[in-house]
Image: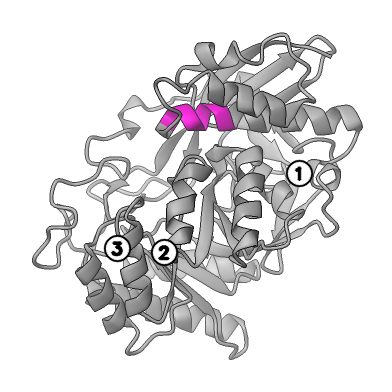
Amino acid sequence: MRITGYRTLTTVHEWGRPVGDANGVFADGRVPVPIVVVETDEGLSGVGIGPHVEIERIFAAIDGEDPRAVTTLYDRMLRHTFKAGHAGPVFGTIGALDTALWDIKAQAAGQPLWRLLGGRDRRVPAYASGLDIALSDEELVSAYIRYAEHGLRAAKLKGGLDIEHDRHRLHLVKEILTEAGHGLRPGLMLDVNEAWTRKQAVRHVCELERTLDLIWIEEPVRRWDAEGLAAVGRGVRASVATGENLTGLEQYRPLIAAGAVDVVQTSAIGGVTHFLRVSALAHAYDLPVSPIGNSPFGLLHAATSVPNHLTSELQDLWPPVGVSVDVHVEDGAFVLGDSPGLGLRVDEQRIRAVDRHPQAQAVDGPNVRPEQAGRRLLATTDGVLPAAGGFPLARTATPAHNSNQVSPTGRH
């Protein structure tokens, strides 16, 4: 079997509500989702969700190769980018191609990827993560009731701009999950997306911990600040979670060596091989791992095969438009199916008909770090107007939820 080519697509994820974090908000809830399809001479094709940046140069490393040699091909792709570096979207492109190759390898073996990788249990524990910083109290409650109905008993909220508001919202979600769990204490996490300085992080988390028990604080300071992350970890009771924006083991080593991370995270777009290697490194230090992302399908399969998986992020309950996947959510877990490979299928005709909404990548969206991040003296809404109930509503009207979305089981 030989790799013969690739196709790129871009669909959208339609949340039907605003989504974002301390850095900004997609007010219309439409987020672009790039996809890579790798083709072979035997008719099998694999799918990877992730960027297309520098894909021609990176694809040259695997063109004509046997796709089943996945880990070797992963290293070839890294070598093809070593001069300019493999950070950011370039690393995401490598990850998307790597995930597609694992998809092909498992299909060729006639097995779901979780089984091929040595997983025993198809259930992957999950926590709810609504990218919810722009929601009113009513919208927040509605969103997490829906998560609770699927058995989720742990939740990660977005925050970092107003501690009193964060406390209020965490208590709201705590009440929802406690009731759903018949009095069992839920798990609560807060993600501030690198919005604080070291002192801000310790001060703000300690204030929250006066009335809340946080499992972890995520990305409290800059992703590469090993000394700062370690200082936060020493100053608060909560664990420090980070790693979703790191690219390569060389960026994890100094954090682990400094005792700067308690929960090791990897992003879905980093790919399966990256996740497996990070998991092995973390396991050597008795650290748990937790995949991040709204389409972490490859990492869910890989999570079944590592001994230190803790929990995986579940954002929306619906996949991107034109994407169906053999996985469903019940009793607080992703449940993987038996379809060969990732169990992921794309409706290319439907995707090509999608309005990809070029304005979705706003100049003040969550992918752009605000000028005053880490230098805010007072609580701020960063230009997002306060809602009647307290904090930000979107600056535009919330669109109705798209009734044509594909469910995680592929059903409408």
Q: From the viewer's perspective, is 42 left or right of 63?
A: right
Q: Are marks 2 and 1 in contact (CB under 8 Å)?
A: no
Q: Quadrant of the C terminus?
A: top right
Residue type, mark 2 in image: Ala
Magenta residues, dominant SS class: helix
Circle 2: element type: loop
Q: Position of residue 73 (x, y in %)?
A: 68, 24
Circle 1: element type: loop
Residue type, mark 3 in image: Gly
Q: Where does label 3 land, which residue?
A: 228
Return the disc, 2 or 3, that comes first in the chain's sequence. 3
Q: Are marks 1 and 3 in contact (CB under 8 Å)?
A: no
- Chain part drawn in magenta: 89-95
Identity of the residue drawn at 36% across and 52% down: 223
Return the disc, 1 or 3, that comes first in the chain's sequence. 3
Q: From the viewer's perspective, is 284 left or right of 354?
A: right
Mark 2 Cα-neighbour bin, 10 Å: few <14, some 14–19, many ≥20 = many
Q: Is residue 248 above or below residue 124?
A: above
Q: Where does label 1 land, which residue?
A: 326
Q: Position of residue 241 (x, y in %)?
A: 45, 63
Front tag of 2 and 1: 2
C-alpha separation, residue under disc 2 versus residue under disc 3 = 8 Å
Q: Is residue 234 above or below residue 223?
A: below
Mark 3 Cα-neighbour bin, 10 Å: few <14, some 14–19, many ≥20 = many
